[in-house]
Image (cartoon, rainbow, N blue to C red):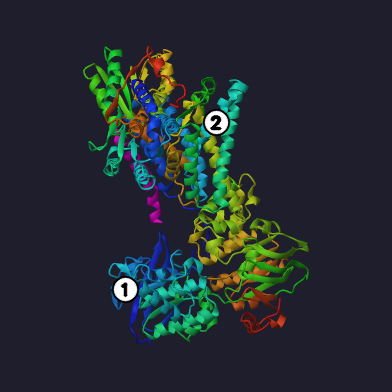
Amino acid sequence: MSDSPAILEARDVSRSFGPVEVLHGVEIALRAGEVHALIGENGAGKSTVMKILSGYLEPTTGELLLDGKPVRFSSSEEAEDKGVILIHQEFNLAEQLTVEENIFLGRELKRGIFLDKKRMQTEASRLLSALETRVSPNARVSDISVSDKQMVEIAKALSRNARVLIMDEPTAVLTNREAEVLFRQIERLKASGTAILYTSHKLDEVARIADRVTVFRDGARVAAVKAGEMNEDQMAQAMVGRELSNLFPAKSPMADRKTVLAVRDFDVENIVADASFDLRRGEILGFAGLVGAGRTELMEGLIGVRAARGAVEIDGKKVAISNVKDARRLGLVYLTEDRKGRGLVLTQGMRENLTLLALDRFGRYALDAKAEDAALTKAISEFDVRAPTRDVRVGNLSGGNQQKLLLAKTMLAEPDIVIIDEPTRGIDIGTKQQIYEFIHKLAASGKSVIVISSEMAEIIGLSHRVVVMRSGRITGILQGDDINEDQIVRYAMGLEGRAAA
Amino acid sequence: MKLTALAGALALGVAFATPLYAQDAETAVIGVSIPAATHGWAGGMNFHAQATIAALEERYENLDFVLSTASDPGQQVSDIEDMMATRNIDALVVLPFESEPLTGPVARVKEAGKWVTVVDRGLSQENIEDLYVAGDNPGFGRVAGEFFKQQLPDGGNVLVLRGIPTTIDNERVEAFEAAIEGSGIEIVGMEHGNWNRDDAFEVTQDLLSRNSDVAAIWASDDDMAVGAIEAINQAGREGEMWVLGGAGMKEMIERVRDGDEMVPANVTYPPAMIGTAIELTALNFVGNAPVSGEFIIGSVLITQDNAEQYYYPDSPF
Amino acid sequence: MTSETATIAPARKGFRIDFHVWGPVIALLALIALGAFLNPNFLSYGNVTNVLARSAFIGIIAVGMTFVITSGGLDLSVGSMAAFIAGVMIMVMNALVPSMGVGWGVIFVGMAAALVVGVAAGLVNGLLITQARIEAFIVTLGTMGIFRSLITWLADGGTLSLDFAVREVYRPVYYGGILGVAWPIIVFALVAIIGEVIMRKTPFGRHCAAIGSNEQVARYSAVHVERVRLAAYVLLGVLVGIATIMYVPRLGSASSSTGVLWELEAIAAVIIGGTVLKGGFGRVWGTVVGVLILSLIGNILNLANLVSPYLNGAIQGVIIILAVVLQRQKKTER
C-alpha cells in the first residue's frame, strides 16, 4: 500500500494569520486508494491544512505537490477542477435550491443552451440511491434533515469525480446506520483509486476505516502511523498530549429523589405524541434515540418555541410555557444542538452573545457594560474559553470554544433545569472531557440536567436514567444495569416497549 | 377666462340641441387620460377634469366618461390601451405625461378611427390629433420676462427656479431669457425646484446664501413661489426682492389682489384647459358641428388691477 | 488560538485607520472642506443653520429607520406617512380653530394628533409584518401607496394649508430657537443622542441587532422577536410624527408632493452611516453623518456652479456609492 504514489502531498507547509503562525511545517501525503485519517483537538490546525490542500487558503511557506509536481491552487475552484474536493463541516449548500440543483450547481448538465433537467434528475437519483438515502432530488435543501444534507454534500462530491476527497467530520451529524452507509461508499471510492482524507473525533471510527493516521497537536504533526500501529487510547493521548484517564466522571449518587419536572401526555405539533416523564433533583436524564425520533422537538415544545399540548409541572406546580422567556423565568433553559443557527449570533462578539439570554440581569433600561465585561471575564475562566482576543467575532471561534461559550451563556440565566442537546457534537476529546465534567458538577450541585445525545457512550457514561424515543413516542425509560447499548438500541429500533409510555 | 366663456356658450348651445339628438344616438364613450395630481397645478387640472365630467354626464344621457389618472408615462400608455380594449371608447382626451412615449399609443387610437384630443403637451408627431388645446409655454416665459423688464428698467440680479426638466420647462425658460435679453437683467442663479415647495425652499435658501444682491426671483410656478417666499422671510431679506410665480394659484392671486409687495403679479396657465378640451370633444357626439383644430390659451399677466376676475375660491388650486 | 497558555488579550489597536468606522466621517470632513473652499459663505451661520435644519426631517426619520433596518426590516412608507401625518395634523388644527381659537392649545392638540397617527401608522406596518407575517418590503410598499393616496384625497389633489393665524403662532417651531440654535436642530440632536444611547446601552438595541443577525438565535435566547420588531416600527412611526411636527411650521402646507422620496434618502443615510442593510449591526451616529453627507452634497452643488444642474443626481449617486465602498474595503481584507 505504501507503494502507491501520493496524488496530493503537502511538504513543510506553514501558515500564518497576521503575525500568528498556526501551522508549523507540517507534512501529509494522500495516496490513491487509501483512507488517511487526520485527528487532533479543535484548533490543532486540521481545518487549516484541509483548506490549504483544497485551495481555500494558500500556504505561507512550503509547497503542495500534485502527482509529484509542485502546484499552486489560486482558488478552490481550481483545486476542484484538478479533482481535489473538500466537503465542509458547515454545509455549503444553497438552502433554497433543490437537492438536484445543489448537486449540479456550477456544473449543470446542458443540452444546447438549455439545462438537461432529465439527465440531472436521473444522475442525482442514482447518486443518492448509491448512498442509500431516501431524500428526493426535488426536495428543497432547507426542508431536509441535517444528515440528509451531509449525504447531499457527499453526492455532490461524488458527482464531481474526485481524485482526492477531503471530508471534514462527515459523521458528526450522521446516525450509526447512516455512517455505515458512508463507510461503504468510502470503501467503494477507495477501491476505485480515490485518495481520501478524513477527520473525525470518533476514534473508534478512525481505527476501523483508516489506512493511515496523522495526529496534529497545536499546529504541528506529532504522529504519522499506519493503521494498527496505534490503538484508540494512544491516539487520544497523542492528540491531547497527556494521559486521558477516564472520559466520564464517576456518577454521583442522587441525593434527593424529589421530582422537579413532571411532564404528562405531552404532544408537540404532529411530531411528538403522549410523552410523559419525570426529572429529579440532581439527576442527569439521558434522551436516546435515532436522529429524527423527536427528542429535540419534544424539548423545543417544552420551552415554548414549538406549539405543544399537555401537562407540565415544575416543583409540583402546574405551569404554562409559551415562549423561552416564560421557561427561563421558571428556571428552565435549553441549549440547542444547532450552535450556529440557533445558539450564537456568529457576527457578533462574545460579550453580546454571552449576555443575550440573561440580558435583563444587566439592567432593565440601560445596560451595564462593566458588569457585562466582568461576566465575560468570569465565563472565560470558568468555562476555559480560548479566544485570540476578547472582541473576536464568535463565528471565528472553534466549535469547542463556541460550545463552551454557549454553555456559559445558558448558565448565566441561573437555571434549575438545564436541557443540553448534543453537548459535544463536533468537539474534540479534550473539550469533551471538560464538558462532561461540567455536566457532572452541575448535577452534583443540585441542578437537574437532561442530556440529548446520539453518542451512545455519552448517554451511557453520563446518565442516571435514560429515556428512549422512537418516532415521536417514548418507548422506554431505563435505569441501573439496563442502561447499556444493547437495551437502548432495542428500544430505539422499536424491538421493545411499543406500549411503554 | 375668454375661453371658459366660449366653452360655456358652446355647451349651452348644444344643450338646446340635445333632446333631439340623444334619442336615436347610441351612447358615446369618451376616455380621459391625465397625469395624477402630484403637484398643485396637476391637482387643479384633476379638479377641473372631474368637475367637467360630472357636469357633462348629468347633462347628456348618451355620454359616458372613463377617467384615469397615471403617475408615470408607462402607466398612462397602459391606461389608454385598456380603454381601447375594454371600454371601447369613441374618443380620447389625453394630456400626455411626456410627448415621446405617448405619441405611438395615441397614434394607434387615431388609426382605429377614434376622435383624439390632445391637451397641453403636444405629441412629437404632427397631425395625429383632431383637436389640440394647450397653454402657451413660450408665452408664459415671455410674459414673465416682459414683466421683469418693466419692473427692473435699470437691470438687476435675478434668480430663476426651474421646474422638472421637461420640454415645457425648457420652452418657458428660453422664452424668458429671450425676453430679458439686452435689458441689463442678469440671471445670477438658476436651479431646478421641480415644481415642489420643499425643493424650492431649500434651493432658494442656498441661492440666497450664495448671492448677496438679488432684486427679484422668477419662481415660474406658484408652488415654488410659496417655498421661495418662505426662504426669503427666513433670511430676513423681505424688503430686498419680489417673487413672480405662475399658473394662478388662488392664494397667490389673493396676495396680488391685496397688493402684497412681495407678490406683485402672476402669469396664468389655467389648469381649467382640460375642462375646455373635454367639453369641446363632447360636442362631437352631442352636436352636429365637429370642433377641430388648435386652441392655444394664451398666458396673461395678472396684476392688482385684474386679479379679482382670476380668483376661484372653490378650486383646490 | 491553539496554545494552551494563550491568554485573551484585548483587541490590538492598529495605527491604520479603520475605514469601516471612520469612512463616513472622513467623507463628511472632505465635503465640508470642499464646500468651504468653493464658497466663503458655506461656513456662515446662515448656511450652516439652513443645512442642519433641513436635515432634521430626514435625520429624525433616519434614526428610527436605523432601528428598523438593524432588526432586519425595512420601511418604504415613511415619506408618504410624513405627508399623511402632515395632512391630518393641518386638518385637525384648522378644524379646531373655530372652537379653541388661535393659540398654542390648538398646536399642542395638532402635535398630539401627529404622534397618535404616527404610532397608529407604525402599528399598522408592524402588525402586518409581525402578525400577518408578510415581507416588510411588500407591506410598506403597500402602505406607501395607501398613505400617498390618502393625502392626495384629503387635499383633493391640491394643497392643504394651515390656517394663517395658527401658522404665525406655530412658525417659531421651525424658524426660532434658543441661543441661536434652531429648534429643528435641537430636536434632531436630542433624537440622535437618545437613539444612540438606546442602540448601544439598552436591551432593546441589543435585541434589535440580535434579531437582525439571526432571528432563530434571538428566539432561542428568550427575546420576544415579534414584540421587538413591532416596537421598532412603532418607534419609527413616532419619529416620523416628530419630524412632521417640525416640518409643518416650515411651509404650513401639505400636499401629495410632500415627503416624496424621503424613504430612499433615509435608507441611503442609514447605509452610508455603516448600518448593514441586511440587519444585525446598526449605529445611530453613523446615520447622522449619513444624513449630513446627503444634505451637504445638495447644498454644495447649489452654492457652486460645478456641474450642470441636470447632473446633480449623478453626483449624489457617486458620492453615496463612494462612501459605502470606502467602508467595505476593510471587510474584504478580513
Magenta-colored stretch includes residue C332: yes
- Within-10-Å neighbours for mark 1: few <14, some 14–19, many 20+: some
Q: Is residue A483 left or right of residue A9?
A: right
Chain letter of mark 1 equals: A
Give the magenta part as a residue range.
C309-334
Q: Is residue A404 left or right of residue A186?
A: right
- On residue C89, the disc is 2
Q: Observer-nearest residue: A55 or A104? A: A104
Amino acid of disc 2: Met
Question: Where does the image place residue B170, in percent across and percent down from the top left?
Answer: 27, 30
Which label is found at residue A82? 1
Q: Quadrant of residue A478?
A: bottom right
> Residue B317, can we see it?
yes
Principal SS element in the magenta part?
helix
Residue B262 visible in the displayed image: no
Position of A172 compared to A334: left or right?
left
Residue in the foreground of this view, choosing between A46 and C316: C316
Q: Nearer the viewer, mark 2 or mark 1?
A: 2
